[in-house]
């Protein structure tokens, strides 16, 4: 089940809200959330519920062992056990086939294996449970003595399958003492409707259009067509993932939780480092706090630390070399900005620095998109004129003219400008006693529903990570 589905919007969510707010007992509300979350997660592949529950048991138990053995070696053993068991689950289900393929290639073997289906959300909930044991070990979080509450944290459906990565320490107080109110619920509805519109109206529409170029006949693509195709994909992945994060944050608010932001207009950045401070914030902060800083951060072995973090960042996204190259690509750029040309970049006009980011970001998305590196390099070649049919072809020009409004609004929604326009209209409408949030929500729900009724193209790109 996905958030951008009629089943979720008009059946699952209303029923869950009624059951949740139909009681004032916090224990029953927790049980309702657990039952709803497990039902949501098991909608497509119920067998993987067991894996998630086992992961919860492992980290709940290790957290208790760490807390009870502060002064002896068992606390270290429990932390190591948590890391090994969790990463073994993740490695087996996500990277087993990738590892065997590379062993076969390097040693000329032909080891056969059964291709396993990837449990949805395993990359997210693995990091969430690991953050709990790390923080209990370091004394940053109090141990959770109720398995029911811990299971609710692990299985909480808004952020379960595609993030943001919610750390236990950030919502520990809310797990035990959350008090939802109408203002928070209303803000959650608005945030959900905004994310739904970003996903259904923009991401799905530009995604279908980008496929015409990225999956089309390369012998017919011009230079402008190649740039247009990857630009549309950049819009798709941003509105797809940030839209999902918006919906997750909004749903969290509806049930009394405040999740941290996961995006902060990354496409307005002016450097690779700034881009990653704004893009998938929860993943970047996880690697910073649990890998980069413990390794020494900026203080010692800087190059090694950067390489490790960005190798892991790429690998986290998928069991394929293109993701690793994509991660290392950004690691190299961030290293060069810090050590070689960052001081020069800062002296350049703002628009040049922004153009620099747009170019390197679009090149990066080519590595990210094409699993086959040869195909990706061929596409990059067409972007600079190698193998392209012409500078611009008639079909591309037709697509630009017929979709100029869509491209304009995608650009607008990628910046804070829209938020300022919304605030301006809100102050104008208040004179007529009209609540912009209500008007906005109704329009977004209506448009999204209309598009979902007749739309077959509705992927969530980050579900496969």
Image (cartoon, grey):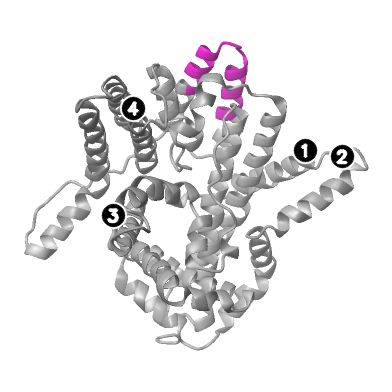
Q: Earlier in the sequence, mark 4 or mark 1?
A: 4
Residue for point 77% across, 51% down = 422
Q: Which mark is residue 434?
A: 2
- State the residue at coordinates (50%, 23%): 175
**Range of magenta residues:** 11-33
Q: How far apart in space, not on screen, are marks 2 and 3 (Cα)? A: 50 Å
Of the two numbered discs 3 and 1 on the same chain, state the one appearing first in sequence.
3
Q: Earlier in the sequence, mark 4 or mark 3?
A: 4
Which of pointers 4 and 3 indicates the residue nearer the eye? 4
Disc 2 and disc 1 in contact, CB within 8 angstroms: yes
Q: Residue at x 54, y 41 (%)?
A: 260
- Rendering quarter of residue 373: bottom left
x and y percentages locating residue 45 in the rendered image: 35, 34
Indicate left or right for 305 with 8 as reference. Answer: left
The answer to whether the residues at label 4 and label 2 have Cβ atoms under 8 Å apart is no
User: Can I make out residue 210 in this image?
Assistant: yes
- Give the vertical position of 413 relative to 168 (above or below): below
Helix, strand or loop for the magenta stretch, by majority: helix
Mark number for residue 319?
3
The answer for how far apart the CA atoms under marks 4 and 3 are is 24 Å
Say above or below: 328 vs 296.
below
* Mark 1, secondary structure of its residue: helix
Using the image as rendered, state which of residue 144 and residue 200 is in the foreground: 144
Does the image show residue 5? no
Which mark's residue is nearer the viewer, 4 or 1? 4
Which residue in the protein does label 1 denote?
438
Q: Residues within 10 Å of mark 2 (few under 14, many from 20)?
A: few
Looking at the image, is 399 positioned above or below residue 145?
A: below
Query: From the viewer's perspective, is residue 388 above or below residue 251?
Result: below
For discs 4 and 2, the disc positioned in front in the rendered view: 4
Rendering quarter of residue 121: top left
């Amino acid at each position: 089940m996905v958030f951008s589905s009629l089943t979720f919007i008009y059946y699952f969510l209303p029923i869950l809200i009624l059951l949740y707010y139909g009681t004032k007992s916090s224990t029953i509300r927790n049980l309702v959330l657990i039952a709803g979350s497990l039902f949501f997660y098991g909608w497509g592949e119920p067998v993987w519920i067991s894996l998630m529950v086992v992961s919860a048991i492992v980290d709940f138990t290790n957290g208790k062992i760490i807390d009870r053995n502060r002064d002896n070696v068992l606390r270290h053993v429990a932390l190591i056990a948590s890391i090994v068991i969790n990463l073994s689950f993740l490695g087996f289900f996500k990277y087993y086939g990738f590892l065997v393929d590379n062993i076969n290639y390097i040693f000329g073997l032909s080891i056969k294996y059964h291709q396993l289906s990837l449990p949805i959300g395993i990359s997210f909930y693995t990091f969430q449970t690991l953050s709990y044991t790390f923080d209990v070990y370091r004394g940053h979080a109090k141990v959770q003595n109720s398995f029911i509450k811990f299971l609710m944290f692990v299985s909480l459906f808004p952020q379960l399958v595609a993030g943001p990565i919610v750390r236990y320490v950030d919502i520990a107080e809310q797990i035990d003492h959350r008090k939802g109110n109408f203002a928070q619920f209303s803000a959650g509805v608005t945030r959900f409707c905004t994310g739904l519109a970003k996903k259904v109206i923009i991401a799905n529409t530009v995604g279908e259009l980008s496929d015409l170029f990225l999956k089309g006949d390369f012998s017919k693509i011009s230079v402008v067509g190649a740039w247009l195709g990857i630009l549309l994909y950049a819009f798709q992945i941003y509105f797809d993932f940030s839209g999902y994060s918006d919906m997750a944050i909004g749903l969290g608010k509806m049930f009394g939780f405040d999740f941290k932001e996961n995006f902060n207009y990354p496409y307005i950045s002016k450097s690779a480092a700034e881009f990653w401070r704004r893009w998938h914030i929860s993943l970047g902060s996880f690697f910073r706090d649990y890998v980069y800083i413990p390794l020494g951060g900026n203080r010692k072995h800087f190059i090694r630390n950067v390489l490790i973090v960005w190798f892991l960042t790429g690998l986290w996204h998928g069991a394929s070399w293109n993701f690793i190259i994509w991660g290392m690509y950004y690691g190299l750029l961030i290293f060069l900005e810090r050590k070689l040309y960052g001081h020069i970049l800062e002296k350049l006009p703002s628009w040049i620095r922004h153009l620099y980011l747009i170019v390197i970001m679009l090149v990066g998305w080519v590595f990210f998109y094409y699993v086959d590196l040869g195909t990706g390099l061929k596409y990059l070649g067409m972007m600079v004129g190698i193998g392209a049919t012409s500078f611009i072809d008639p079909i591309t020009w037709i697509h630009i003219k017929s979709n100029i409004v869509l491209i304009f609004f995608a650009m607008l929604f990628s910046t804070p400008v829209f938020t300022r326009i919304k605030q301006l209209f809100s102050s104008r409408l208040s004179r007529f006693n009209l609540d912009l949030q209500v008007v906005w929500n109704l329009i977004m729900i209506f448009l999204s529903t209309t598009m979902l009724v007749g739309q077959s193209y509705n992927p969530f790109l980050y579900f496969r990570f």
